[in-house]
Structures are given as C-alpha cells and as structure tokens.
Image (cartoon, rainbow, N blue to C red):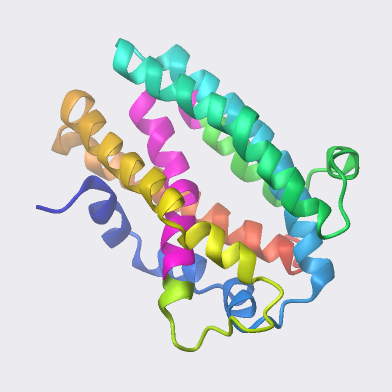
Amino acid sequence: MKTLFDRLKAAAPEEWLAYTEHPFVRALRDGSLPESCFRHYLAQDYLFLIHFARAQGLAAYKADGLEDIRQAAAGLTAIIDVEMGLHVEFSARWGLSESDMAAEEEDAATMAYSRYVLEKGLQGDLLDLRVALAPCIVGYAEIGAGLAADPATVMDGNPYREWIEMYSSEDYQQVARAEVAGLDGLMERRGGEARFESLAAVFRQATRLEAAFWDSGLGVRP
C-alpha cells in the first residue's frame, strides 16, 4: 500500500521534479555550484530553521494527543539543540559565523515558504502543517540519497560532499522515514479521502516554494 507521502508526490510530478532535479541540486552533484551561492543558501537555511522551530512549537499546540505533542516536542528539541548547532558548525567551515547568518536579511523565497508553512498550520490542523513541511523534511532525504547513489555524482574533490553525506546518512534517512510514518498516522486519525485533494494542493504549493528556495540560492529573484 502506498504511503500518503507517495500519493502526494504522485499528485505533484512536475513540481517534485523541478524541486529534486533543480539546477542547484545538479550543481551540488558535480561540485560546480559557485561557493558564494552555497554560502547564501546556508545563511537563508539558518533563518528558515528558526521558523521551522516555530512550526514545531505550533505542531505541539495543534496536537490533541500526547503522542503528537511528544513528537512535536522532540522535533523542536532536535532543531534548537542539535540541528542548529550542526548547521552553525558546518557553516563556520564555509566562513559564516552564527552572527553573520542571524544578521542576514530574509530573502523573499525564505519568507514565502516559512510563512506559508506557519499559515497552513494556523489555518488548518496538524495534518495540514505536517504536509506543508514534508517536501522539506522528506525531500532532502530523497535528494541526498539520490545524489549519493547516482554514478554521475562527483564525490572526490567535491566541496559539497559533506552536505550530500549528511542528507544521505542513515540518521537523516531515519528522520524522513519517521516523518512518512507520522503522516500516515495523522491521515488515519484526521483524514479520509475527502481531504486528499486539499492536502495535495498544500503539498504542491510547498514543493513549488522549495524550488523557489533553490532559485534564491542561485541568485534568481522573483
């Protein structure tokens, strides 16, 4: 049986391809991405993570059962106590301090995606919020695994090898699998087929905004 995530992805084939095979991703594959673009991406990703933490707090508020509250609390703790630290440590190797990233102005693409996620969470329920986040959480796992498995990916001498290894790692793949399973559980408790089309619309829009985030990394402005 297909997971909810598989069904959502199948309902957004063009958007998903534009996101996961974006020129930014292809440039990570062969190491041709200009370093200035990657540093810009890292700073914007730091700002996005702050809003991601807010979304996890909202998920706890929107939850109506202890299991969902625990999941949201664990996600929030992971972001602020682990992921932010790893991001700061990683970015420092690219010449970016935490104060540098915190002082960056949010791009329109960063603002659009982060506020869209929060809006869906405020407007809808926990399932709407998790679907809006799914292209980010699960999409990075798919991109990382795809790059790691692709024979065309250059690893030796690739300045982005560590990024590829991070998102293709078993630790991150486990995070993505847990998110997919969590979506299925929420759909069972809160969903039903009548909701699928509206959830697919949320997923498509979130995926388009993820592609726009890559555009921003390449210096493409809306």
Regarding residue 15, the answer to whether it shows in the image is no
Q: Residue 128: within the magenta? A: yes
Image position of 27 with respect to 195: above or below: below
Q: Is residue 107 left or right of residue 14?
A: right
Q: Between residue 59 and residue 199, name the one nearer to us.
A: 59
Q: Between residue 108 and residue 4, name the one nearer to us.
A: 4
> Picture quarter containing residue 161?
bottom right
Regarding residue 119, the answer to whether it shows in the image is yes
Q: Residue at x 26, y 40 (%)?
A: 181
Q: Residue at x 81, y 58 (%)?
A: 93
Q: Is residue 69 left or right of residue 107?
A: left
Query: Could you say where residue 122 lies in the image, as x and y percent from the top left?
Result: 50, 21
Q: Quadrant of the C terminus?
A: bottom right
Image position of 173 with respect to 190: above or below: below
Query: Could you say where residue 15 lies in the image, as x and y percent from the top left?
Result: 44, 64
Q: Residue 58: within the magenta? A: no
Q: Is residue 205 left or right of residue 68?
A: right
Q: How many marks?
A: 0
Q: Residue furthest left?
A: 1
Q: Between residue 214 and residue 93, name the one nearer to us.
A: 93
Query: Could you say where residue 99 lies in the image, as x and y percent from the top left?
Result: 90, 38
Image position of 35 with respect to 116: above or below: below
Query: Could you say where residue 170 lies in the image, as x and y percent from the top left?
Result: 40, 55
Type of secondary structure dominating the magenta stretch = helix
Q: Residue at x 65, y 44 (%)?
A: 112
Q: Residue at x 56, y 72 (%)?
A: 22
What is the magenta range?
120-145
